Amino acid sequence: MILLNIEDFKKAKFTIGLIILNIICFFMFNSTNQDYFLLFVQDNRSVIHNFEIWRLFTAMFLHADITHLFSNMLALLIFGTTLETNYKFTKSKYLLVYLVSGLIGNIFSLVFIPLDSYSLGASGAIFGLIGAVIILIIFDDPSILLFALFYVAYFLFASFSPGVNTWAHIFGFLGGLLLGYLSNFKEIKQRKLYDY
């Protein structure tokens, strides 16, 4: 069963590092001039018309308010630690899932949310971690899969609240599912070979 204890949290150095980075960015950018802050959030018009591609990346480390930051960092602590301390995921694979899922969520946000919209937050990347954890559950402990799917359904349902970038959540999650599957592809293939 996938359970966390204090030792897991101590080992999750990349997760703790990402949490610290997000907290530093929150206080650093939220205490500055709003025009400066807006240079780093995802502004769809600026990305598409001015090719300010960096916004797709920097927006993953910015949060609108303390509640937004707290809820994302709590989810990052739980799902990040689960993934980072699993023997099937190297640190580089873990970071790849986090960053690529976040970018996938932000890229699809360019398509599905209005041109004059701002978007920010780590939730697309965190939903990617959730997707990868679901893959682990499917292959390591399918007995808790139903519980995990209810949990994911709750998170996705909450994504439909006003002012939430639902598309970043959905496509970040799908990106995490795909990357989690690809990270375990060799083992999955071997299991299938043994099944015959």
Image (spheres, helix red, strand yellow):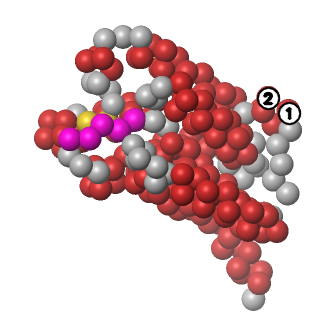
Seen at 74% across and 66% down, the residue is: 145
- Magenta region: which residues? 116-120
Q: Which SS class for mark 1?
A: helix
Left or right of residue 47: residue 61 = right
| Three-letter code, disc 2 | Lys
| Three-letter code, disc 1 | Glu
Nearer to the camera, 116 or 163:
163
Identify the main secondary structure in magenta.
loop
Nearer to the camera, 87 or 76:
76
Q: CB atoms at circles 2 and 1 under 8 Å apart?
A: yes
Give coordinates of residue 51: x percent, y percent. 18, 38
- The residue carrying mark 2 is 10
Q: Residues within 10 Å of mark 1 (few under 14, many from 20)?
A: few
Left or right of residue 80: residue 194 = right
State whether residue 164 appears in this view: yes
- The residue carrying mark 1 is 7
Q: How many marks?
A: 2
Seen at 27% across and 24% down, the residue is: 39
Residue sitting at the far left: 49
Q: Which SS class for mark 2?
A: helix
Check the image and report above or below for 43 versus 177: above
Give coordinates of residue 129: x percent, y percent. 60, 48
State whether residue 179 appears in this view: no
In the picture, the quarter occupied by the C terminus is: bottom right
Seen at 64% across and 40% down, the residue is: 75
Q: CA distance from mark 2 to mark 1?
A: 5 Å
Check the image and report above or below for 151 versus 19: below
Give coordinates of residue 48: x percent, y percent. 18, 43
| Residue 82 position by quadrant | top right
Q: Which mark is residue 44?
A: none
